[in-house]
Image (cartoon, coloured by chain):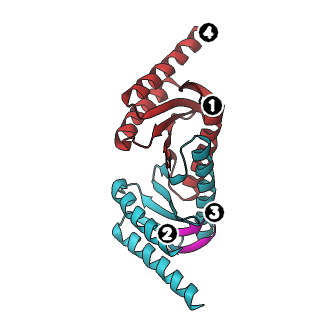
Chain colours: A red, B cyan
C-alpha cells in the first residue's frame, strides 16, 4: 500500500513541476497506454475521463500511423488547434505524458521540459 | 476537362516546390478531408492509398481531439517516430497537406515551408 501511495506521489510531483515551468501549460497528466488515468494536474472543470480517452485514442492512431508509414516507434504526437496545443509523449512502455498548452506556448521549451519529465516518469513507471 | 488538368498541374507544382525545399522531405501529398488522394509527390515504392487513408484517419482523430479538449479548429497534426515525422496541415476546408520527413528534418523550416504551401493550396482548392 505504501509503495502505491509513494508512486502516485512521485508522479504528481513530476506533473506539478512540469506545470510550474510555464504558465502556458494548462494541464498535465500521465495516462496508461490503454487510456486510464494514472496521475493528473488539471484545473477545476476539465474532464479527466475525456482527456485520458482522447489521449489513448490519438496515441493508438499515432502508433499505427508511425508503423504503417515506416516512421519507427512512436515518440510524440502533437495536435495544434486555433486555441492551443495537445502534446502526447511516450513515458516508458506503459505510460503517456499528456500536456494541454495555450496557443502562446513556446513549443521548443515545452518539448524540452516534457522530455525531461517523460524521462523521470519512465524511471518511476 | 482542361480546368481539371490545370488544377492538378497546379497542385503538383506546389508539392514539387515544397519537396525541393529540403532533402529531408521524403514525400508530400494533398488528400481530401475524407482520405482520397488529390495530388502526390512520392518516391517509388510508397503506397499512396495507405498514406492517404492514414492521413485521413489521423486528421479525423486530431479534429475530434481538438474539439473535445477546446483547442479550437484543427490546424496541424504532427507524429514523431524514431525514424522520422509525419506532418498534416489543413489546406482550406477540403484539403490536407501531408509531408513525410526524415528524423534529421529541421522542423521550424519545414513548418514554415508547409504553411506557405498550404496557403497556396487553399487558394487553388
| SS at mark 2 in the image | helix
Highlighted range, magenta? B28-39
Q: For mark 3, what is the residue?
A: B53
Circles 1 and 4 on the same chain: yes
Q: For mark 2, what is the residue?
A: B122
Q: Which mark is residue A47?
A: 1
Circles 1 and 2 on the same chain: no
Q: Residue A7 at x, y = what percent?
A: 53, 17
- First-in-chain label (1 vs 4): 4
Mark 2: few/some/many CA within 10 Å (<14, 14-19, 20+): some
Q: Name the subunit of mark 2.
A: B
Question: Are the residues tagged 1 and 2 within 8 Å (C-beta)?
Answer: no
- First-in-chain label (2 vs 3): 3
Circles 1 and 3 on the same chain: no
- Tell me which corner region of the image, top left, top right, bottom left or bottom right, holds residue A16: top left
Measured Cα–Cα span from mark 2 to mark 4: 57 Å
Circles 2 and 3 on the same chain: yes
Question: Are the residues tagged 2 and 3 within 8 Å (C-beta)?
Answer: no
| SS at mark 3 in the image | helix
Name which residue lies at 39% across and 38% down: A110
Amino acid at each position: 500500500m505504501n509503495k502505491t501511495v509513494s508512486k502516485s506521489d512521485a508522479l504528481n510531483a513530476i506533473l506539478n513541476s512540469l506545470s510550474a515551468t510555464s504558465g502556458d501549460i494548462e494541464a498535465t497528466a500521465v495516462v496508461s497506454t490503454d487510456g486510464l488515468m494514472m496521475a493528473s494536474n488539471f484545473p477545476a472543470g476539465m474532464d479527466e475521463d475525456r482527456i485520458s480517452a482522447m489521449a489513448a485514442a490519438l496515441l493508438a492512431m499515432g502508433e499505427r500511423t508511425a508503423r504503417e508509414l515506416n516512421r519507427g516507434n512512436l515518440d510524440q504526437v502533437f495536435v495544434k488547434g486555433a486555441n492551443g496545443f495537445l502534446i502526447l509523449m511516450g513515458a516508458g512502455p506503459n505510460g503517456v505524458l499528456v500536456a494541454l498548452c495555450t496557443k502562446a506556448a513556446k513549443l521548443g521549451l515545452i518539448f524540452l521540459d516534457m522530455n525531461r519529465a517523460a524521462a523521470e516518469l519512465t524511471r518511476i513507471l
